């Protein structure tokens, strides 16, 4: 029997604990990616999932479900703040939440943070949610491209999450139509940041069974180094009776008993695996953290980004100037060399000594008359006249002058 929905979570290859949580129920599907200063990310995502899980029920309308999800996320936010109040060592913890409730042929969505919801329809994957990140802000304002955002040094900075900072965080909610054959993927950035969307689409197409598909998705991220926790939930939409939804599962830190001990959730970085994988050196993410969505902070980040751009431009300019000065230097040295050369030729019908070489660069001659003698070329013997007209190279200035002397002697 084809399983329609599934959830799985992996700690990844570098982090020492899993701060992601996932839930796949009958109607409700959620991914939460926790983060915290020195501890608490696992607590935050687990608490969020547990306080949202009651929304896993049948709704009469998707609009009701969306409102219920929004309320549940705000309750979770409140609970996180309460927990920090009771356990001050957890201050600064927070979590993303991306969630779906199925209501007939519609879905209610609630989302905050940078976990993502994708719709897979007839082989095409479409990102439905928008990341609440600093780099997404830069993309939206046209300052950088999506490709630049993916490798931006500040790509881990979140502008909105559930946590203990904002009492009423802004939560995106939406209602969407869905139809038989659609599959919905919810994942943490440990998957979307390390597996290309085209590849996610291919893997979903290859594996109709949700449990197998999710394993393939997570394996792909592990193959790419998986420096971060990786969590995915897949929801298939199907009217066929030979498909099953399965009983609710919790994965990641939500699947474990909660511990509030700061030391238990301390992260350590295991360097050997970081060094082993060729991708992970570039891919290792900075510690995720969120910042209150204040205009002041955003402006500070934008100013920093501008300074980075200016530094890059200065480096570029210095490079260009350096190359230009080398070229100018070579030209000057070349010109100086030509001006150390002399030859004998004709100027105004007289035998003359020229400084430089016979060539021209475009309209600019590389030679000039150094000395015009009294000798009329017409007075020379036909042989000498022909030689002078086709120019006679000299070793140096005295040599050139002695050639003129010899021509003078010829006439005397
Ligand atoms: Ca993450």
Image (cartoon, rainbow, N blue to C red):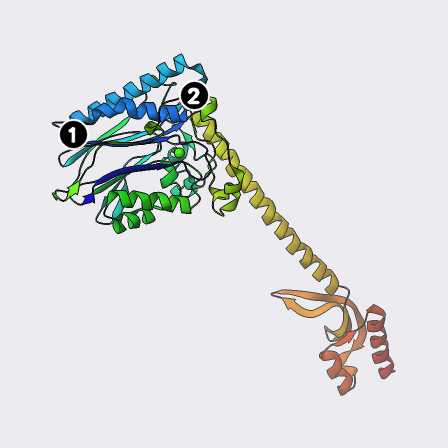
Q: Residue at x 42, y 38 (%)?
A: 12
Which quadrant of the figure has residue 212?
A: top left
Q: Residue at x 24, y 23 (%)?
A: 70
Q: Residue furthest top?
A: 86
Relative image position of residue 37 (x, y in whole percent): 46, 24
Task: Assess whether mark 2 and mark 1 are in contact (beta carbons under 8 angstroms).
Answer: no
For the residue pair 31 and 375, the one nearer the viewer reads as 31
Residue carrying label 2? 92
Relative image position of residue 7 (x, y in whole percent): 28, 37
Taking the image as shown, residue 126 lies to the left or right of residue 91, namely left
Asked if 172 appears above or below 244 in the picture, the reply is above
Taking the image as shown, residue 364 lies to the left or right of residue 46, namely right
* Label 1: element kind: helix
Which quadrant of the figure has residue 227?
A: top left
Q: Tell me if residue 83 can be seen.
A: yes
Relative image position of residue 124 (x, y in whole percent): 25, 48
For the residue pair 299 and 56, the one nearer the viewer reads as 56
User: Would the CB of label 2 be found within 8 Å of ligand 1?
Assistant: no
For the residue pair 337 and 278, the one nearer the viewer reads as 278
Mark toward the start of the polypeptide (1 vs 2)? 1
Taking the image as shown, residue 264 lies to the left or right of residue 47, namely right
From mark 1 to mark 2, how far is it between C-alphas? 33 Å
* Label 2: element kind: loop
Q: Residues within 10 Å of mark 1 (few under 14, many from 20)?
A: many
Relative image position of residue 106 (x, y in whole percent): 16, 35
User: Would the CB of label 1 be found within 8 Å of ligand 1?
Assistant: no
Q: Residues within 10 Å of mark 2 (few under 14, many from 20)?
A: many
Residue carrying label 1? 62
The number of discs equals: 2
């Amino acid at each position: 029997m084809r399983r329609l929905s599934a959830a799985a979570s992996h700690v990844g290859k570098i982090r020492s604990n899993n701060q992601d949580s996932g839930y796949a129920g009958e109607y409700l599907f959620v991914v939460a990616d926790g983060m915290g200063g020195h501890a608490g990310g696992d607590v935050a995502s687990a608490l969020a999932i547990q306080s949202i899980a009651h929304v896993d029920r049948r709704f009469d309308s998707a609009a009701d479900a969306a409102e219920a999800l929004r309320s549940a996320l705000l309750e979770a936010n409140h609970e996180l703040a309460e927990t920090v109040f009771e356990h001050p060592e957890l201050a600064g913890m927070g979590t993303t939440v991306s969630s779906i409730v199925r209501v007939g042929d519609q879905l209610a969505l609630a989302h905050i943070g940078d976990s993502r919801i994708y719709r897979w329809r007839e082989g095409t994957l479409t990102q439905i949610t928008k990341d609440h990140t600093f780099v997404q802000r830069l993309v939206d304002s046209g300052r950088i491209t999506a490709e630049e955002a993916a490798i931006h040094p500040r790509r881990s900075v979140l502008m909105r999450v559930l946590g203990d900072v904002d009492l009423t965080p802004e939560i995106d909610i939406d209602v969407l139509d869905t139809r038989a054959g659609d599959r919905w993927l919810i994942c943490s950035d440990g998957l979307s940041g390390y597996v290309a969307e085209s590849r996610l689409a291919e893997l979903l197409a290859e594996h109709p069974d949700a449990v197998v598909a999710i394993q393939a998705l997570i394996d792909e991220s592990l193959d790419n180094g998986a420096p971060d926790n990786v969590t995915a939930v897949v929801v298939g939409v199907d009217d066929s009776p030979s498909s099953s939804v399965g009983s609710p599962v919790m994965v990641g830190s939500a699947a474990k008993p909660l511990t509030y001990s700061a030391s238990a959730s301390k992260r350590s970085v295991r360097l050997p695996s970081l060094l082993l994988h060729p991708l992970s050196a570039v891919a290792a993410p900075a510690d995720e953290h969120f910042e209150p969505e204040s205009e002041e902070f955003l402006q500070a980040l934008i100013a920093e980004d501008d300074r980075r751009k200016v530094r890059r431009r200065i480096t570029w300019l210095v490079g260009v100037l350096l190359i230009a000065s080398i070229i100018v230097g070579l030209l000057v040295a070349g010109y100086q060399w030509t001006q150390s050369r002399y030859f004998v030729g004709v100027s105004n019908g007289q035998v003359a000594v020229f400084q430089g070489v016979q060539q021209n660069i475009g309209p600019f001659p590389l030679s000039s008359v150094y000395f015009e003698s009294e000798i009329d070329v017409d007075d020379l013997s036909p042989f000498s006249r022909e030689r002078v007209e086709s120019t006679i190279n000299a070793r140096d200035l005295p040599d050139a002058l002695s050639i003129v002397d010899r021509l003078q002697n010829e006439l005397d």
